[in-house]
Image (cartoon, grey):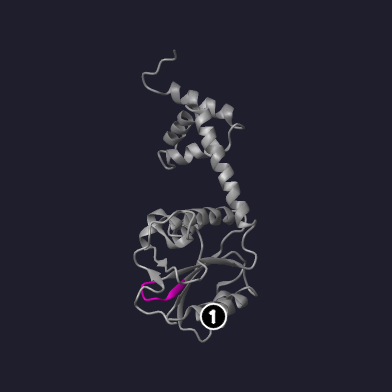
C-alpha cells in the first residue's frame, strides 16, 4: 500500500494521549519519549563522543515494506564502517528523512562513500557536518521544547521504529542510562530541599560572579549534584553572599 496525500503516513492532528502510551504518536507521548531520549543521548555523548551529523532526505514515496527493506540494507553496510544513532523524521510530502549521529572515528570522505554505496539506486540528498554541540543537536533531532513546532507525527498505522542504533552506539544499555538520570534527579530534588537556603544563596553569589552567563537554575543543579561532599563550600559561598548583601545584619 503506497502513501498518498491522505494522512496515512502522518497524523496532522495528533491526540493529547498519555505520556506512557503510544510513544511518539501522541503529543504527551512525544513529550515524554523525546525528553527521555534527548537526555540519554546527551549523557552518552560524554562517554562516546559524537563526531558527525548526517541528514538523508529520501526523495521518493515508498511503501512501509520498501522503507524497511531499504533501511535494513543500508544499515547493514553502515555497520561495516561506523557505529551511530538514527532517528526517522517524516515530512508533509509523505517522505521519510533521517538524522544520523556517528560516534566512530571516520573521515568525511569515507562517510560520503559509505552513503553512496548504502543508498545506491535510491534518489536522495544528504549533508555531512562535524558535530560541535551535542547538547543542541540532540534536543533538535528529538524536537524537544523550543523545537516542538517542527514535529511531524507518524500515523498509528505506520509500524516503523522512530529511532534505532547502528553497531555499538550506547556506552551502557539505554535503560541503565535512564535509570541513572532518574536517580540523579531525585538526589538533586532532595538536596535542594535539604540544603535550602544555602544552595540558593551560594548559587546567587556564583550567578553574580559570572555576570549571569550561567542561569541560576543551572548553577543550583550543579551545586546540588555534588552535595553533600561540597557542603562546606556551599556554606562558605552562602556566607559570602550574605556578607555582600546591602543592608544585611547578622542577627
Residue 95, image x and y in percent? 42, 76
Q: Residues within 10 Å of mark 1 (few under 14, many from 20)?
A: some
> How many callouts does the rendering have?
1
Q: Secondary structure at mark 1?
A: helix
Residue 107 is drawn in which quadrant? bottom right
Q: Quadrant of the N terminus?
A: bottom left
Q: Against 179, is 103 above or below? A: below
Picture coordinates of residue 84, whole percent (x, y): 58, 66
- The residue beneath circle 1 is 70
Question: Outermost residue, top direction?
Answer: 251
Q: Main secondary structure of the magenta part?
A: loop
Residue visible at 44% across and 63% down?
25
Q: Quadrant of residue 78?
A: bottom right
The reply to whether residue 160 is visible in this rendering is: yes
Image coordinates of residue 6 in percent, x first then y, are 34, 76
Question: Residue at position x 57%, y 82% from top?
Answer: 117
Give how far across and how far down residue 104 sits, in percent.
Answer: 62, 66
Q: Is residue 160 left or right of residue 176?
A: left
Does the segment drawn in magenta span residue 95?
Answer: yes
Which residue is nearer to you in this view: 201 or 211? 201
Classify residue 250 as left or right of residue 13.
right
Q: Quadrant of the C terminus?
A: top left
Q: Which residues are magenta?
A: 91-97
Amino acid at each position: 500500500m503506497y502513501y498518498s496525500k491522505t494522512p496515512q503516513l502522518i497524523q496532522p492532528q495528533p491526540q493529547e494521549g498519555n505520556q506512557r502510551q503510544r510513544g511518539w504518536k501522541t503529543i504527551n507521548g512525544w513529550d515524554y519519549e523525546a525528553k527521555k531520549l534527548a537526555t540519554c543521548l546527551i549523557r552518552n555523548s560524554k562517554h562516546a563522543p559524537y563526531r558527525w551529523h548526517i541528514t538523508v532526505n529520501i526523495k521518493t514515496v515508498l511503501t512501509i515494506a520498501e522503507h524497511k527493506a531499504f533501511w535494513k540494507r543500508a544499515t547493514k553496510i553502515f555497520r561495516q564502517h561506523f557505529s551511530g544513532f538514527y532517528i526517522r523524521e517524516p515530512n508533509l510530502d509523505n517522505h521519510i528523512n533521517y538524522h544520523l549521529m556517528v560516534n566512530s572515528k571516520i573521515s568525511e570522505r569515507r562517510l560520503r562513500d559509505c552513503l553512496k554505496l548504502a543508498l545506491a539506486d535510491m534518489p536522495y540528498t544528504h549533508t555531512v557536518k562535524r558535530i560541535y554541540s551535542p547538547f543542541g543537536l540532540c534536543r533538535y533531532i528529538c524536537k524537544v521544547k523550543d523545537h516542538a513546532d517542527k514535529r511531524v507525527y507518524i500515523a498509528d498505522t505506520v509500524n516503523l521504529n522512530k529511532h534505532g542504533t547502528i553497531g555499538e552506539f550506547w556506552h551502557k544499555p539505554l535503560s541503565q542510562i535512564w535509570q541513572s538520570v532518574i536517580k540523579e534527579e531525585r538526589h538533586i530534588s532532595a538536596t535542594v530541599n535539604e540544603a535550602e537556603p544555602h544552595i540558593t544563596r551560594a548559587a546567587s553569589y556564583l550567578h553574580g560572579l559570572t555576570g549571569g552567563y550561567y542561569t541560576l537554575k543551572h548553577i543550583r543543579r550543579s551545586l546540588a549534584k555534588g552535595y553533600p561532599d561540597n557542603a562546606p563550600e556551599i556554606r562558605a559561598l552562602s556566607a559570602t553572599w550574605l556578607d555582600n548583601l546591602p543592608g544585611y545584619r547578622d542577627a
